[in-house]
Amino acid sequence: MKTPLDSILDYHQRTKHHFQKYAAGPDFLDWDSQPDPFRIFTGSAQLELPLLGTQAQSLFQDLFTPGGVAIQKLTLPNIAALLELSFGLSAWKQYDNTRWALRCNPSSGNLHPTEAYLVIQGCNEISDGVHHYMSRDHLLEQRCRFASAKPVFPADSFLIGLSSIHIRESWKYGERAFRYCQHDAGHAIAALRYAAATLGWRLHVLDTWSDADIGAILGLDRDADFVSAERECPDLMLLVTASSGGETPFTFTADGPLKAAQNCDWQGNANILSPEKPILWPVIEQVSLACIKPRSQQSFLHPPSIPTPLGTDCNLSAVEIIKQRRSAQKFDGNTLISAPVFYRILDMTLPRADIAPWDAIGWEPRIHLFLFVHRVEGLVPGLYIFLRNNYVEEQMRAELSAEFEWLPVAGCPEHFSLFLLMEADMQKAARTLSCHQNIASHGAFSLGMLAEYQANLFLNPWVYRQLFWEAGMLGQVLYLEAEAANVRGTGIGCYFDDEVHDLLGIKSQVFQSMYHFTIGGAISDNRLQTLAAYEHLSRKV
């Protein structure tokens, strides 16, 4: 009988794309069976949330200075702002008669498998209990009301829970969809952390909690509420704190919220997302079961002492940057970026104490970046590597090709572990390895994410999900930093896994690829109409 680790290793191997064969997926897109991108709980009490107004807003650069944004009170408008800037709609797009929504949190294929829940107590304008956030209408659906007023949260705190609906991704991407759902959860963590930073709030993943804890608190284990509807898998729980002090997330357990959720009246039934059922991919259910997380010991991140983040010339507000984020569809193939912009983007992938988004997680960096530099002023085109922790260099040198030069990059910040592996025109390689997509070669640079894979999975198999979360968080950093640099980025989930490893000379499973990304000057499609995010709502800002 397979162990969870065996199932995860097998899943990762079978869902790799190769030159000769792509991972198993649908032969064509059956539009009649596409799942609804919006979950609704019919029969639940609804609370309309206010939209962000035009009041003065903090600059994007203020988010990265401890104390740079004043701490806002725990109120309905501020909670609404948190949800709007993380899970809310940023625009509607229209091409001819086809119309679709864009959201502040990125998603593979814009399919949005991630659902968000608010668990709150003691906010005068919101009923105590569990609420589902419905992004289409920017409202809360109350799933349960706590029977007791006994406090179960630290002062000035509440919870945000995340879940995944795997079928939303598998409808398009088949067996590889589980990977993309985890990417999206990582994007959501970072999106929430940035949104919390605009309010001066703290946010932390409660990584000791089990999936069973999270599912019970959010009501995801309630069969009666999902009779014919597609189920949601619990992903993670986050503690949001609207004060500078109070209890740390490391001492907050699931016991209080669990008891409160078990002693309340639940309401609402989940809608069926796809009456015409899409193809099912059993391996996704298998790997999901193998990745179930039990309660665990707390992990602690001890960021190295490095300088404050490099500066940015961006003078836009944080809200503007978050809401204007888009996934580029084409790059011009000409735009150069300066070395300071390039270094700023890389610098923001490094963890620092009390700096968004990396203070949201409690584990050391496990993912490193190999870079195809095409057009960065002051850097020769070539293959580079950027290490995000201090202990991996020796092992990385041993695993990668012996032909690489490992030349320190002159002029880069002193705290960087940035090396030139090989000087060469890497445009063809970048395009080919990213499933022959021109966007990987037409940007100023593209990159792949290389995870410390084997050692982490052998220790705790469920860390497989966390590796993708970290990759998704990196993606969100890159998206927003690209916007701040007045260029654009896009994640690339399609790449040839083992062929990437061949380029790097990796022969074992010590390191594995997790995600690709590219940044450059975007070409807009003037045929697309951009419409207001919540134009369908009758209420005004």
Image: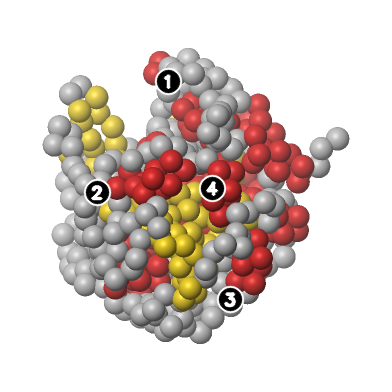
Give the residue at the far left of this rendering: 526
Mark 3: which secondary structure?
A: loop
Whichever of labels 3 and 2 marks the residue nearer the N terminus, that label is: 2
Specify which label sits upstream in the sequence, 1 or 4: 1
Q: Which residue is mark 1?
A: 29
Q: Tag 2, which secondary structure?
A: loop
Image disc number at residue 390: 3
Determine contact: label 3, label 4, CB under 8 Å. Answer: no
Q: Which quadrant of the structure image shows residue 300?
A: bottom right
Q: Secondary structure at mark 1?
A: loop
Dividing the picture into quadrants, the one containing residue 66 is: bottom left
Residue 66 in the image: above or below residue 217: below
Label 4 neighbourhood size at 10 Å, few (<14), some (14-19), many (20+)?
Answer: many
Residue at 46% in and 76% down = 408
Amino acid type at circle 2 is Gly
Asked whether the viewer can see residue 340, the reply is: yes
Name the residue beneath numbered marker 2: 333
Neighbourhood count class around disc 1 (C-alpha, 10 Å): few under 14, some 14–19, many 20 upward: few
